[in-house]
Image (cartoon, helix red, strand yellow):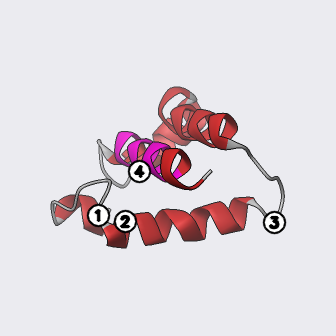
């Protein structure tokens, strides 16, 4: 949320480092390929429970994280 409010782009190296950490956490339970990780990000926007969680922090947070995840996946996976 702080990165979004600071105006950092989804591609910013700070944001991408946070997403890399997120990917590492996800990998403890599941190893998604590029398409699956992008789909996980989309689910943050589309699934009501995820949406409610992210909206409670910032109304654009789900899209921001999903966009950052897509950039990470396209670059790294």
Please tell me which residue is depicted at 47% across the width and 33% down the height of the picture: 45
Q: Residue furthest left?
A: 7
Percent x, y for residue 41?
54, 40
* Cα distance in 3D space between marks 4 and 2: 7 Å
Tag 4, which secondary structure? helix
> Where does label 2 land, which residue?
15
> Where does label 1 land, which residue?
12
- First in sequence: mark 2 vs mark 3: 2
Is 13 placed left or right of 32 in the picture?
Answer: left
* Cα distance in 3D space between marks 2 and 3: 21 Å
Tag 2, which secondary structure? helix
Label 3: few (<14), some or many (≥20) within 10 Å? few
> Where does label 3 land, which residue?
28
> Where does label 4 land, which residue?
68
Please tell me which residue is depicted at 72% across the width and 43% down the height of the picture: 33
* Cα distance in 3D space between marks 1 and 4: 9 Å
Marks 4 and 2 in Cβ contact (< 8 Å): yes
Label 2: few (<14), some or many (≥20) within 10 Å? many
């Amino acid at each position: 949320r702080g990165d979004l409010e600071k105006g950092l782009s989804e591609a910013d190296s700070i944001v991408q480092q946070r997403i890399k950490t997120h990917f590492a956490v996800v990998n403890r339970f599941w190893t998604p390929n590029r398409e699956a990780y992008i789909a996980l990000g989309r689910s943050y926007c589309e699934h009501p429970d995820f949406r409610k969680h992210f909206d409670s922090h910032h109304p654009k947070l789900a899209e921001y994280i999903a966009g950052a995840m897509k950039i990470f996946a396209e670059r790294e996976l």
